[in-house]
């Protein structure tokens, strides 16, 4: 399989200093796991979509149950151009996470992303709410109120500051125990991630 490509950050974006938000974590993740992977992504980024549709499910299956790896998402508004679609999908992730549906939301958004197209109205707030209405177990009234309030906009801006601090300038980018991983074809396979983990955390023995 071909390695994912990367979406570049808009030079117009200037993140403000904000407190780091509580992350969305992998199903079953624990905060004290010895390996922490932070992914910086944009829900409009076709290369993020490719990673999450083609590679992430196998990686989840391989590492989620080991008790050794925690995966965190930091959604960014890199690709907003005359719209707030990246910002709004990022806020939606936090609204969904409040109902323990963060990962289901991410899968839904990427499944409905028209690859190669950005800022065309596909991720308006109305469209996001319509899509979330198809997720089982979601209180859609609560989700809509959360999204419409923009209450997680500060968290999204904080993710920009964290990305800048880690020198992450494209999506998807990963920080593994403090080390930036970007432009690395190994993210496309389970064996590649094992190599990355062995380099970054050699003391951790994965099965």
Image (cartoon, grey):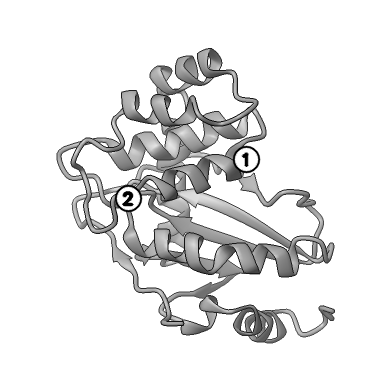
Q: Which residue carries the number 1 mark?
A: 22
Q: Is residue 28 left or right of residue 75?
A: right
Q: Which quadrant is home to the C terminus?
A: bottom right
Residue 95 higher or lower than 59, as above or below = above
Is residue 21 visible to us here? Answer: no
Q: Is residue 119 left or right of residue 98?
A: left
In this view of the protein, which residue sits in the foreground, 40 or 155?
40
Residue 21 higher or lower than 141, as above or below = below
Instruction: Give how far apart the Cα atoms at labels 1 and 2 are.
Output: 22 Å
Q: Which residue carries the number 2 mark?
A: 44
Q: Residue furthest left?
A: 82
Coordinates of residue 42 in the picture (x, y in percent): 38, 52
Coordinates of residue 95 in the picture (x, y in percent): 53, 29
Residue 91 higher or lower than 39, as above or below = above
User: Is tag 1's residue or tag 2's residue first in the polypeptide sequence?
Assistant: 1
Residues tagged 1 and 2 counted as in contact (Cβ below 8 A): no
Coordinates of residue 172 in the picture (x, y in percent): 43, 64
Assign a secondary structure to mark 2: loop
Crowd around label 2: few <14 · some 14–19 · many ≥20 (10 Å): many
Q: Residue at x 52, y 77 (%)?
A: 188
Q: Residue at x 62, y 40 (%)?
A: 22
In this view of the protein, which residue sits in the foreground, 176 or 48?
48
Crowd around label 1: few <14 · some 14–19 · many ≥20 (10 Å): few
Coordinates of residue 158 in the picture (x, y in percent): 46, 43
**The disc label shown at residue 195, or none:** none
Q: Residue at x 43, y 80 (%)?
A: 3
In this view of the protein, which residue sits in the foreground, 12 or 64?
64
Quarter occupied by residue 202: bottom right
Quarter occupied by residue 130: top left
Kindly report which numbered mark, 1 or 2, lies closer to the viewer in this rendering.
2
Is residue 126 visible to us here? Answer: yes
């Amino acid at each position: 399989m071909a390695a994912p490509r990367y979406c570049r950050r808009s030079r117009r974006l200037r993140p403000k200093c904000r407190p780091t938000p509580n992350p969305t974590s992998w199903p079953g993740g624990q905060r004290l796991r010895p390996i922490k992977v932070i992914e910086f992504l944009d829900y409009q980024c076709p290369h993020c979509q490719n990673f999450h549709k083609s590679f992430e499910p196998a990686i989840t299956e391989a590492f989620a149950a080991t008790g050794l790896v925690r995966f965190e998402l930091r959604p960014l508004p890199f690709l907003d151009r005359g719209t707030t679609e990246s910002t709004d999908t990022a806020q939606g992730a936090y609204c969904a996470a409040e109902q323990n549906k963060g990962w289901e939301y991410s899968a839904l958004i990427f499944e409905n992303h028209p690859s190669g197209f950005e800022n065309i109205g596909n991720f308006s707030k109305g469209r996001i709410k319509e899509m979330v209405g198809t997720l089982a177990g979601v209180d859609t009234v609560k989700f809509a109120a959360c999204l419409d309030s923009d209450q997680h906009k500060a968290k999204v801006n904080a993710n920009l500051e964290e990305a800048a601090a880690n020198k992450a300038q494209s999506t998807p980018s990963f920080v593994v125990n403090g080390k930036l991983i970007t432009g690395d074809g190994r993210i496309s396979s389970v064996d590649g991630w094992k190599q990355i983990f062995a380099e970054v955390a050699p003391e951790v023995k994965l099965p």
